Amino acid sequence: MAEGTTRVTRRRPGIGTASATVVFLALLAGNRFEWWDYRPPWNLFLDLVIVWLAVAGLIVVGVVWAYRLHRYLTSNRHWPWPSVIAPLLIVAAAVAFVAIDRPVDQDFDRARTHMESLAESMLNRHIQRIGSIRISDVSLSPVRVESDNCVSFTDSKRSNTLSRSGWLYTARCTPDPRHYGPLVQVAPGWMTYSQRGT
């Protein structure tokens, strides 16, 4: 009886690991797409905790999945269809992460035209700094003309005392990554930047 029960249990390996995979992928998705909102200075700490917890969980689930699949194949000699659910979920999540714009990208697309007008106005009128402004529901603080003539727009929502990130208007400048940190071009004349310890 016990042996028969064991065989029934092993007919569908992968259901449990698929369920666990959904939980950890949901944590990653929530972090990437900003499903929850927490304020500085906790945002950086919680982001790291959530990402590392989700990645560690997926690694553990992958090890368990491989072990159980190996045991099943050793006993039954044929591939169980539920075992492909977890890998398919991971592939689907990876595609979604690439294909779906993050909220930060949506914010930039929505505010870009007005940000560009403001940057040109500041450069033309020699306005060095604007303390705080809201453009198309995007909070920016501060907006300033840097020493190299780039205009930086600090993303208030995603910046804190330990790091500063946002967008850089580069139509009239050549930015130095040593000053701004990693730079990624997001549109002609625009880059994202991320500084630590500012």
Image (cartoon, grey):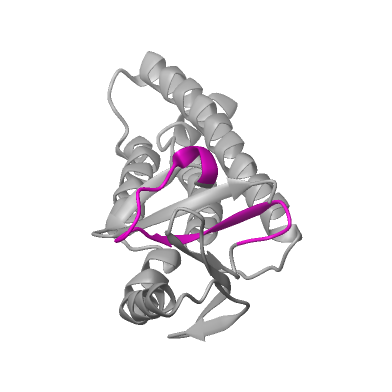
Foreground pick, 110 / 144: 144
Residue 52 coordinates in the image, percent (x, y) = 62, 40
Horizontally, residue 178 falls left or right of residue 142, namely left
Q: Look at the image and tell me whether residue 6 can be seen.
A: no
Q: Residue at x 43, y 80 (%)?
A: 125
Above-or-below relation of 121 to 18: below
Horizontally, residue 144 falls left or right of residue 187, namely right
Residue 37 coordinates in the image, percent (x, y) = 63, 70
Foreground pick, 75 / 105: 105
Foreground pick, 165 / 145: 145
Above-or-below relation of 55 to 25: above
Q: Residue at x 31, y 61 (%)?
A: 100
Q: Residue at x 33, y 60 (%)?
A: 190
Residues shaded magenta: 159-179
Q: Look at the image and tell me whether residue 75 can be seen.
A: yes
Q: Residue at x 47, y 52 (%)?
A: 193
Query: Residue 85, located in which quarter of the rendered image?
Result: top left
Residue 81 coordinates in the image, percent (x, y) = 29, 38
* Magenta stretch: includes residue 12: no
* Magenta stretch: includes residue 171: yes
Query: Residue 196, located in which quarter of the rendered image?
Result: top right
Image quarter where the N terminus lies is: top right
Q: Residue furthest top?
A: 74
Above-or-below relation of 87 to 153: above
Foreground pick, 176 / 27: 176
